[in-house]
Amino acid sequence: MTAQTKPALLGCIADDFTGATDLANMLVRGGMRTVQTIGVPTSNEALNADALVVALKSRTIPAADAVAQSLAALAWLRAQGCRQFFFKYCSTFDSTDAGNIGPVTDALLNALSAEFAGRASFTIACPAFPENGRTIFRGHLFVGDALLNESGMENHPLTPMRDPNLVRVLRRQTQSKVGLVRYDQVAQGDATVRAAFDALRADGVRIAIADAVSDADLHTLGAACADLALITGGSGVALGLPANFRRAGLLGETTHAAQLPRVEGLSAVLAGSASKATNAQVAAWCATRPAFRIDPLAAARGADVVGEALAFARQRFVHAEPVLIYATASPDEVQAVQRELGVNEAGHLVEKTLASIARGLRELGVRKFVVAGGETSGAVVQALDVRMLRIGAQIDPGVPATATTGAEPLALALKSGNFGTTDFFDKALRHLEGAAQ
């Protein structure tokens, strides 16, 4: 174990950066002091946290690489003395038939099996997040009133989700037998759910999709998972986990888990997501003030897009006004760029461009960043050399305020593309610019 004053209770691995802050937000709301690391730490800094969240950028990389990174994160978390582990992915189950949810879950269960024996022979997969409209019924994922494959996620540029049946989706990714914990079982309480776990395990099921349509269901599932070594899902399942540690006498009542320092400086919004929510947020901003739009094709042709964006920012900063710089586009526009540049190259180019702009903005005095999109957030925090985040109060469901550690902190709001109200950018800036939380 490192120099921590006491071992952490819960060790979490998130497959993208906004997902990590989403999960950390949920744990802080439950009274767990939470620290998020950017990648697997290499130092033995004392953390003194109840929960540790390792943020990876592994959602869309090759499955073998995602497995290797996740196992490295698991090894570090085990060295911190964690009692239970959580693999967090998106509430829309973002993945392809090749992975990475299934392969990573298999690898984590295998790695835990020697130490935790029967506790690591079974786990659930539950991306439900009712507060943000993600519910699961009979194994089918809904986004609001629409099935997953009719929600806009079928047009995702990297992980198009065209099958709403998560049992089928997961079966295509994993060598493990996949089952289902049905809603009628969840509705009867955690004892019935634990009995369902036992029956599935006896039938050879190693991973079970779990239905959930309300926060009460997530609390039920959380209680039922108290003895599992590994839990997988969206951040919603974490609702019920702090109470497990309290019932075991391992976690006290914490009233200052969300406290962050006040950060002074200029503000900027960077948006790279092509989701419906982020498109609406960009449109709301542009309806009342100017913004700078990145043209990926111009960047590919060698145009100085970064310089143009920073010149735009300088003009706004004369009056200390916040800026929006975005690559957000409609599905048709995204597909047109992908046809010309290729899917992977288009995404990489946008991330690289926004990362360079983020570094330039910091040199101009920006200390408060709102970032939209999981892949974009990963690129930006890496460009800013962010290693660790303290997690603060919630801005919108799934999106907390955060602050870096160190002598000159940055304030950050890292938003999954699909999250946030239409006025989220203004709301987040007000939150980051406000008093210490």
Image (spheres, grey):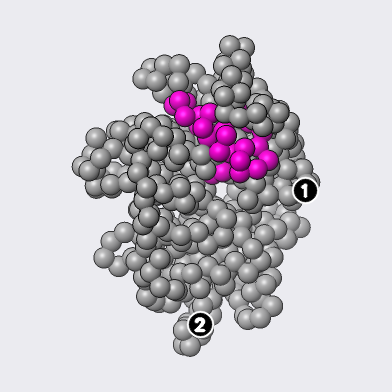
Q: Can residue 220 be seen in the rendering of this structure? A: yes
Q: Residue 199, how many percent across, how many down?
A: 61, 15
- Where residue 145 is drawn, which disc sits there? 1
The structure residue drawn at horizontal position 36% and vertical position 51%, both measured from the top left corner, is 254
Q: Where 5 falls versus 112 (above or below)?
A: below
Tag 2's secondary structure?
A: loop
Q: Where 55 falls versus 423 (above or below)?
A: above
Q: Where 384 falls versus 165 (above or below)?
A: below
Membership of 221 in magenta stretch: yes
Marks 2/1: CA–CA distance? 38 Å
Q: Residue 3, how many percent across, how many down?
A: 21, 42
Q: Amino acid at mark 1?
A: Asp
Q: Residue 241, how many percent across, how many down?
A: 47, 38
Where are the magenta residues, as a range? Answer: 207-236
Residue 43's quadrant in the figure?
A: top left
Q: Amino acid at mark 2?
A: Glu
User: 135 or 167, which is in the foreground?
Assistant: 135
For label 2, the residue is 321
User: 329 or 226, which is in the foreground?
Assistant: 226
Q: Quick one: label 2, few (<14), some, or many (20+) residues within 10 Å?
A: few
Among the two numbered marks 2 and 1 on one chain, the one whose residue lies closer to the N terminus = 1
Quadrant placement of the C terminus: bottom left
Q: Quick one: label 1, few (<14), some, or many (20+) residues within 10 Å?
A: few
The structure residue drawn at horizontal position 45% and vertical position 39%, both measured from the top left corner, is 243
